[in-house]
Image (tube, rainbow, N blue to C red):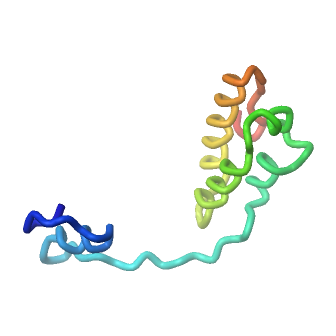
Amino acid sequence: MLPDGSMAGSLEELSHAWQVSGDCKATEKPQQACPEQSPTCRTFFQDPHSSLGDCFQVVDPQPFLSLCIQDTCGLQELQPACNLVAAYIHLCARGFVPLDPPPECV
């Protein structure tokens, strides 16, 4: 909802309508060139020899791979990747496929 009570047509319209004056103005986030696939993400969620591979048939690793690539762009990649690994292991356990975390994430 916009300050005048009408509904915003987009997230951008909403954010611009609620901006405060002064130094708090929208800034463009620079786009970073990301590798198509991080080696760490590929190792965890795509490599057939991954320690998570026993669960690939039970829980689809593709959404985790996609999120991993997004989350690790321009950052230290191991911590965000390990957070996704933990979530993946949790879902695998619900599917009765117990997994240990990779050594990099312990």
Above or below, 2 against 93 in this view is below
- Residue at 17 percent of width and 68 percent of height: 18
In percent of width and height, residue 14 lies at 24, 68
In percent of width and height, residue 100 lies at 77, 27
Q: Is residue 28 visible?
A: yes
- Residue at 70 percent of width and 52 percent of height: 65
Q: Is residue 54 left or right of residue 23?
A: right
Q: Is residue 52 visible?
A: no
Q: Is residue 11 left or right of residue 3?
A: right
In percent of width and height, residue 69 lies at 66, 59
Q: Is residue 13 left or right of residue 39?
A: left
In percent of width and height, residue 62 lies at 72, 51
Q: Is residue 97 left or right of residue 4?
A: right
| Front position in the image: 2 or 29 | 2
Q: Quadrant of the N terminus?
A: bottom left
Q: Quadrant of the C terminus?
A: top right
Above or below, 83 against 20 in this view is above
Q: Quadrant of residue 29?
A: bottom left
Count of numbered circles in the view: 0
Q: Residue furthest right?
A: 49
Q: Quadrant of residue 71?
A: bottom right
